[in-house]
Amino acid sequence: MSTIQIAIDGPSGAGKSTMARRIAERYGYLYIDTGALYRAIGYKILARGGNPGDPADVLPALETLSVTLRHVDGEQRVFADGEDVSDRIRTPEVSMAASAVSAIPAVRAFLLELQRELARKQNVVMDGRDIGTVVLPDAPIKIFLTADAEDRARRRYEELIARGEAVDYETVLADVRKRDYNDSHRAIAPLQQAPDARRVDTTGCTLEEGIARIGAAIEEMMADVG
Ligand code: DC
C-alpha cells in the first residue's frame, strides 16, 4: 500500500510543529517532528561533555548511540539510548547543539534512513529543514513555511517565558538569526525551498490565521493528489 507524505520545511520558530500537528490531526496522519532527532543527538553530546560542533566528539558517539521515536496516543516521544529525552531537548542550549550536529554529514546520514522508514509505514506529516528536498523528495505535498526573523523570535521568546525560562528577547533574536545562518549555509542539505514546494509566509499572522493559510495550500495540493 502506498502512503502519502506531507513535508513541511522552514526556519526555526515559523510555527511548523504546532501547525504540522494540527494538519496531521485533520487528516489522521502521524506527525513526525524530525528536529527532535537532531536535538536528541545534540543533547547526548552535551551530556557527555562533548562539543556538538566537533566531528571528533560526535562521530565516535554515533557508533553506539541509538535514537528512536515512539508514538504514545499520537504524541511523539524521542528516546536516546532508551532514555526518554523529549522534555529535556527543548532548552536554548540544546537548540544550538542540534543546529551544530545537524551540519555534520555523518549525523544526517545516520538519521536519513530512520526518517524514510517512518514515512514508508504510514501516512505522515513530517516537519524539518530538508524533508521536501532530501528526505522525501517524492512527497506529493510540500510546504515551505516561513516568517520574518523578528516575528519568529517573538513567538519563541513568549514560548520560553511561558515555560519559565529566564531569557531576554534580544538573545532569542540573536539565536534565531544564528541558527538561520547555520541551517541555510551548511554544505549538506541546507535549509532551502524545494522547487515544487508551496511557500506559506505567516509573518504577522495569529496561529489560527497561519493554520488557515497552510490548510488552504494543502487542500489545493491534496486535490491534485486525488
Ligand atoms: O526544528 P527544530 O528547531 O527542533 O530543529 C533543531 C535543529 O535541527 C535545527 O537547528 C536544524 C536541525 N534540523 C535539520 O537540520 N534537519 C531537519 N530535518 C530538522 C532539524
Image: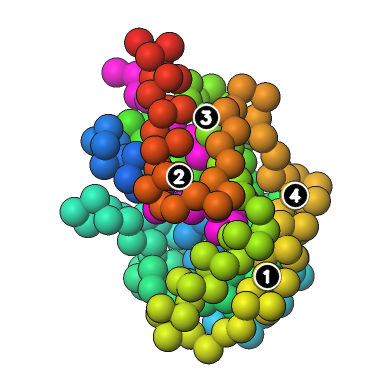
- Mark toward the viewer: 2 or 4: 2
Residue 143: percent from left, percent from top: 53, 34
Mark 4, ligand 1, within 8 Å: the answer is no
The relative height of residue 141 versus residue 117 in the rendered view (above or below) is above
Q: Disc 2 versus disc 3: distance between alpha carbons?
A: 16 Å
The residue that mark 4 highlights is: 184
Which amino acid type is shown beneath numbered disc 4? Answer: Ser
Which residue is at the far front?
A: 204
- For marks 4 and 1, the one nearer the N-term is 1
Q: State the SS at label 3.
A: strand
Which amino acid type is shown beneath numbered disc 3? Answer: Lys
Left or right position of 114 against 208: right
The residue that mark 2 highlights is: 210
- Mark toward the viewer: 2 or 3: 2
Taking the image as drawn, is residue 56 in sight?
Answer: no
Taking the image as drawn, is residue 192 in sight?
Answer: yes
Q: Disc 3 versus disc 4: distance between alpha carbons?
A: 18 Å
The residue that mark 1 highlights is: 173
* Viewer-closest of 43 and 128: 128
Which residue is at the far bottom?
A: 166
